[in-house]
Amino acid sequence: MKVKKIIFMLFTVVISASLLFFLSGCKGAQTTTVTNTTTKISTQTTTITDISTLTETITETVSGQPSTRTIVDDAGRSLVIPTTINKVLCCGPVECILTYMLAPEKLGGWCFLPNSTEGADYFDTQYADLPVVGGWYGKSTGNYETFISLEPDIILASDAATVEERQQFFGSIPVVSINVFDNYNTMPESILKMGDLLGVEEQAQKLVDFYEESVDYVTSVLTNVSEEDKVTVYYAEGDGGLSTDPSGSQHTELIDFCGGLNVAVVDDQTGFGMTSVSMEQILLWNPDIIIIGRAADATLYNQILSDPIWANLQAVKDGRVYLRPNNPFSWFDGPAGMNEIVGIYWMIQTLYPEQCADLDLKAKVQEFYLDFYHYNLTDADYEALMANTINTA
């Protein structure tokens, strides 16, 4: 009996101690849990703050960067422009054409009416129907109110000398001075610069690649043409074809570039160009080839071929009188710019057809029109386009 009592007492002590230990442990655990909970809440709060910051960063990245960026334009002016450009207007035709070639969906209007032939505009409707807003080039005068009413993100101006004047009239709309064309050597730089400005770098590189391939082709052809074999060229402009531009002029650079010898020895007229010459002088120059260009319509072609005075020229005797291809933009001059890139292939074949027997001109033209004029030029389109540009007699 005593033994049972002792055992019971020992069991009670053990149970009591265990219970006390358990309760004490639970209280400590509860305190630790509260402490940990407090810590977790504090940590969670920090995490939420971090997520908020990350969300802002992600939003900026997904939306494509901050809403504005600062650039220095070609007039040396620091400008704040939208990071994403959705609508562009241009002060002149060179920047307008290049904008269309690189980012047609961003062009808000033409500064001039593109060339067309009846039933053949070589434009998809969405581009053909863009408004003609005018500009400031040559003898043309734009309308500031018309530009402002179309709410462009930026306005492009190739004339650095007048960009500040334009900016005063356009107010808060950034007017970006961009030198889109100096000469053939700077073409790639100008194209890539425009591609960066408009956010279309890949399309700009594609145009540069096409240009560089044409340069390589011209180089390969001219390696087989001696100085003695180079053809002489008269560029007939203006009323009656009695105006021209000399070698070295921006207006006739395509002739020089493709190895033709410009016969005109006249003063280089800056800007709009064109120097008047006499028929007697043209007869003395007696060119191998005549190319009919700016401010001279197709009737001059027939006039030259039928006029008894022009008939004394070697070019007319040999049937080497050519109208430049002109739709939707000129392939040679009018304006001088990136639109002449497709004209490189045409010019080299016009000057040296025998050395260009391997050139598929139609394929090159169709490639260019699809990629940069955004128009699928069919075989029939090509024939219509070239019908009045090359004398095949």
Image (tube, rainbow, N blue to C red):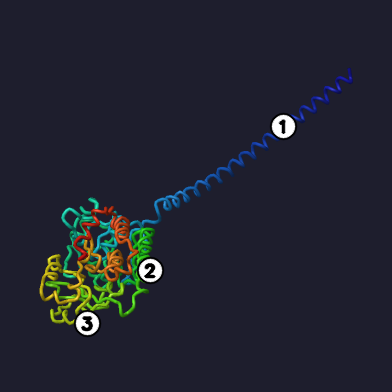
Q: Find the residue positioned furthest to the top.
A: 1
Q: Give the numbered dot on residue 22.
A: 1
The disc, 3 or 2, on the residue closer to the chain's N-terminal end is 2
Q: In which quarter of the image is the N terminus?
A: top right
Q: Residue at x 26, y 78 (%)?
A: 247
In the displayed structure, 379 sits above or below 80; it is above
Residue type at mark 1: give it: Phe
Quadrant showing the C terminus: bottom left
- Residue 220: percent from left, percent from top: 38, 70
Q: Residues within 10 Å of mark 2 (few under 14, many from 20)?
A: few
Tag 3 and tag 1, C-beta contact below 8 Å = no
Q: Position of residue 50 (x, y in %)?
A: 50, 49
Amino acid, disc 2: Asp
Instruction: Describe the element under mark 3 as helix, strand or loop.
Output: loop
Left or right of 152 in this view: 40: right
Residue pointed to by mark 3:
265
Residue placed most toward the observer, 105 or 36? 105
* Residue 203, image x, y percentages: 36, 58
Foreground of the two, 186 or 232: 232
- Alpha-carbon span between mark 2 and mark 1: 91 Å
| Residue under pointer 2 | 216
Query: Tag on residue 150?
Result: none
Secondary structure beneath label 1: helix
Q: Nearer the viewer, residue 357 or 146?
A: 357
